Amino acid sequence: MAPAPQIKEITMHKSLAVKKAYFAVTLIALSMIILSARRMPAADKTAAPAKRSTPTRIHHSSDFGWKADQDVSTELAGLLADGKLKAGEELVLDHRYRIAGSYALPEKFTLSAAKGAGFDVTDAAKPKNGRPLLELGNNNTLHNLTISYLNTPKLGPTGEKHEVHFTRRLGIQAKGKHDLRIENCLLTGSIQHHLKLIDCTRIEVIGCRIAGGHWSVFLAGDAGLVFRRCLIEKCQGDGIKTGDGHTGAVRKVLVDNCVFQDNLRDGIDTTGGFNDAVVRNCIFRRLGTSGMDIKSHYESRTGRIEDLAPENVGIVIEKCLFHDTPNALVLTTLDCGRRKGPGRELLTAANMKKYAPHEIAVNDCTIGHAEKPLRSASKGGYGVNYPSSKGEHMRMILLKDAYDITYRNIRLAGERILPVRISSIGGSRHLSRAAAGAIKPTITGNVLKEPAPAIKPGVTNPPFTCGPQKKASPKPPTKNGPTGA
């Protein structure tokens, strides 16, 4: 939010001066309240909690005679096919088991585990097809699982080549589902995606640690998501990546108290939108490109921009720490119609204002660096590769083609940090000069004079507990007893 304008001191009759000053201050306060309300999607509205159901019966893997380190691929497939694991029930994994293949879970089903128990996936290096390990149904819960993908490449960031730095294995997927909860899970391995959600609603990902993956979490067309107390790290691309879904842009998202670290590219890349989203109390550190790449990317199957929803409108980023990354935030608009030649543009001077990223507020954040020595990313560091004439090492905002951006009460930690760099891509193969010229890249805000405290280098632990816990969430006994006996 932009700082309040200053009221000039003038000489007039005292009572009149008091009245006018009071009126001016009131107008300023009201305008700030209105602007704040316009910019601040309420967390309660952006992401409603997933509905949870109580299991009607609880099975333990040991009830079926499963032994630690046993390959249970055939056994699990049989239980699901024979209806011995039904909708509304729960399976608790007592040990770690080897597994391969793909398994669709019934609706209202819970899959949970004792601490350290779960699956070692044996076909991750060379998957036979693109099917996921787990295909979720409506009202599914995954709790306390450990899933390791064996014999996959080293965790990132090492590179972005398929079959070299990550495999094409897909972990957990849901398409068109609702009310999903993934809690206290550990997902690790350099695969394509650990979590892929397409056109889903009401999703909660709570207290999870996700290590590795190309786009570790891939979202498209989803609405009503919560990520809380999650550590997403060592990705060969982006921690969270959004893409195109059939139901429009990714929207109504809350990312709260999460850490994104040691990724090859970004913490969050919003190529498929991130509308009406709040990102707060998060840490973005040691990232190869940016903390958040807010990128509106338009590619139409019909050739009509009218068939696409505006992306990246109404984003609030507050109380976050960005350090050791070339850019805290990048804002870009891309017109993929230009790839097809002149006259095929989707974005024009007439519609650019509707589709470019806008209404984005960055409040009370800290921007800085801790790792030494200061080197550019191309030389093994975390600084910008192509600084401006000011010679910056890091930028808070790289504004390419967006508008109506505000920042408030920003604190800097370290030297050579440039608050804003404006650099349009208009006239390139990604955006026409006419479209870029139709908007003014407006950005206003303030940086506090007092520097932020020094940032400690080399920190890898998050400031919260995540991953599998010793005790599972308490569950009420069912009519069949605690184990369904």
Image (cartoon, grey):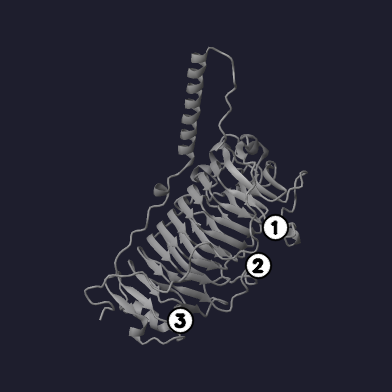
**Left or right relative to 369: residue 116:** left
- The residue lying furthest to the left in this view is 479
Compared with 5, 403 (above or below) is below
Q: Position of residue 89 (x, y in %)?
A: 30, 72
Q: Earlier in the sequence, mark 3 or mark 2?
A: 3
The residue to which callout 3 is attached is: 96
Depth check: give the residue in front, 399 or 413: 413
Q: For the residues labelled 2 and 1, say whether their Cβ atoms are less than 8 Å apart.
A: no
Looking at the image, is mark 2 or mark 1 nearer the viewer?
Answer: 1
Compared with 67, 135 (above or below) is above
**Left or right relative to 30: residue 444:** right
Which image quarter holds the N terminus?
top right
The residue to which callout 1 is attached is: 382
Looking at the image, is mark 1 or mark 3 nearer the viewer?
Answer: 1
Depth check: give the residue in front, 437 or 445: 445
The residue to which callout 2 is attached is: 161
Secondary structure type for disc 1? loop
**Distance between the alpha carbons at the discs numbered 1 and 3:** 38 Å
Characterize the local packing of mark 1: few (<14), some (14-19) or many (20 or more) Cα atoms within 10 angstroms: many
**Distance between the alpha carbons at the discs numbered 3 and 2:** 30 Å
Q: Amino acid at mark 1?
A: Tyr
Answer whether residue 59 is visible to the viewer in this image: yes
Secondary structure type for disc 2? loop
Q: Amino acid at mark 3?
A: Arg
